[in-house]
Amino acid sequence: MARAVTTKQKIMFTAAAWSIGLLIFFPILWTVLTSFKTEAQAINDPPLFLFFDWTLENYSVVQERSNYMKFLWNSVIIAGGSTLLGIIIAIPAAWSMAFTPSRRTKDILLWMLSTKMLPAVGVLYPIYLLFIELGLLDSRFGLVMVLMLINLPIIVWMLYTYFREIPGEILEAARMDGASLKEEILYVLTPMALPGIASTVLLNIILAWNEAFWTLNLTAANAAPLTAFIASYSSPEGLFFAKLSAASTMAIAPILILGWFSQKQLVRGLTFGAVK
Amino acid sequence: MATQHSRSAARMMMAPAVILLLGWMLVPLTMTLFFSFKKYLPLRGDSVANGLDWVGFENYVRFVGSSSFWPSIQATLVIVGGVLVITVVLGILLALLLDRPMWGQGIVRILVISPFFVMPTVSGLVWKNMFMDPINGLLAHLYKFFGAEPVQWLSQASLESIIMIVSWQWLPFATLILLTAIQSLDSEQLEAAEMDGAPVIKRFWHIILPHMSRAITVVILIQTIFLLSIFAEIFVTTAGAFGTKTLTYLIFQRVLESQNVGLGSAGGVYAIILANIVAIFLMRIVGKNLD
């Protein structure tokens, strides 16, 4: 970063980067703006950018018509539940891989990651059938399980990379002092690894929130999360741009904000450490 | 060093995750493989309980022989290839730009990364309606403004439209990974080249690009795995019409819409093989980085 850059160059880079950044962000901005228009203004010719009568009407209409809260609640339960369950199962596994590695640890880790690459559609019918047989179709519990399983490899992997940064001597010292395994993990490792665990939780909530294969195929009326709620707008009736925008804004806003905080974890979690 | 005691404890700790994933992998996979050799039409009364007829490789032959197979392979390759080219090329350029000194870099990063966090059904529908609608879409307004005839995006340029939507979603990912790679480049080497008077293009070609090559490979492999199975973006836009029926979508239709499970399962086995070919290369790179 020691390269000398003139102010003129810096202005140029700033202008270029901001223009492209805003261009890429524009569809999201446009959706948010449209959500505050009336349906007539939403399709006005020429398009209205900022000067229209701002209204919150669409938000209340969407809420009333389709019971948005239920979908939101389903999304929260499914994304939160699958992440929590995944973390509980992954912490011990990542602990043993990071602190008592054996010759096979690497192979097990790679195998776990490889299950992530199984195309979902290849096992669609078996899962569908099992869900029917077990009475899990259109249930939040079923989706929690499936999303936990598809994200478990990433959770184990991320925790493993974070745990490896913690010196094993500290755990050993705790063991010497007579801490049991449970105490060692709960009271020594977990607090130290808390930032890493938090990052892992964040990324996995995002992934589970946006998952749109299993959530679309395994739910109907009861357990449908926001992905399915939005998909119901794919067969529109009449004017609906503003309502679609309000629904979309409500579906993406929470996760967008979480996402802004998780940029760095994204690289770690989704490249499996192949890019540092 | 680990004692005998902690070693067996370690195995116990790993067991739940390993057993769950083993089950998650083996049970459905075995079922898919089993169904792929059977005649299985649930709507005509076939069921596992009543026993299914063994048909050998007939489903495999019929899946490849059907008139929608090769178009679906073509659509898949065009979409995956198109998105890869766009996201990697633009990703490199954007990463190079974002690496330069500027004001408000953090905010620009947030703007660029945002599309990645938008759920696929939202990006599909927002693009389809508010941008690509031939009458009220913003692109139609833009075309009319310049005196051009608006395009019927999702019917006349359906593959291009899907590529645009999916590229918008994945460009942030490519950019972020490639930016991480660029930032780990030793700047002294670049400075030395700059002092020696190497022009920008040469510096890029001989120093920056080789340094990024592994990151580029990783981006390509990971994106390929995810792109091979894109679903929601097609589900809410064209529902597989206008030549956008990818392999994933074709299998979905066979299995859940026309309920020909045997045929769909054979397709599923093809998809699994295809994904595994890509996965092998990715796992090799990942494996090398694990000590």
Image: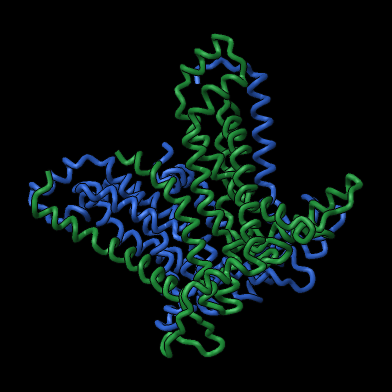
- Quadrant (top left/top right/bottom left/bottom right) for the N terminus of chain B: top left
In the image, residue B45 sits, relative to residue A196, either above or below, namely below
In the image, residue A167 sits, relative to residue B78, either above or below, namely above
Residue B169 relative to residue A86: left or right: right
At horizontal 55% and vertical 36% (from top left) the residue drawn is B106
As rendered, which of A183 and B63 lies closer to the eye? B63
Q: Position of residue B30 (x, y in %)?
A: 38, 71
The residue most toward the top is: B196
The quarter of the displayed image where residue A14 is located: top right
As rendered, which of A258 and B149 lies closer to the eye? B149
The quarter of the displayed image where residue A78 is located: bottom left
Kindly tell me whether residue A70 is visible in this rendering. no
Q: Position of residue A119 (x, y in %)?
A: 48, 61
At horizontal 76% and vertical 55% (from top left) the residue drawn is B157
In the image, residue A103 sits, relative to residue B274, either above or below, namely above
Kindly tell me whether residue B135 is visible in this rendering. yes
As rendered, which of B255 and B208 lies closer to the eye? B255
Q: How many marks?
A: 0
Q: Position of residue B85 (x, y in %)?
A: 62, 42
- Quadrant (top left/top right/bottom left/bottom right) for the C terminus of chain B: top left
Residue A184 relative to residue A70: left or right: left
Residue B86 relative to residue A113: left or right: right
The quarter of the displayed image where residue B184 is located: top left
As rendered, which of A267 and B38 lies closer to the eye? B38
* Colour scheme: by chain
- Chain corresponding to green in the figure: B
Residue A74 relative to residue B104: left or right: left
At horizontal 67% and vertical 19% (from top left) the residue drawn is A8
At horizontal 55% and vertical 56% (from top left) the residue drawn is B228
Q: Position of residue A262 (x, y in %)?
A: 47, 47
- Chain corresponding to blue in the figure: A
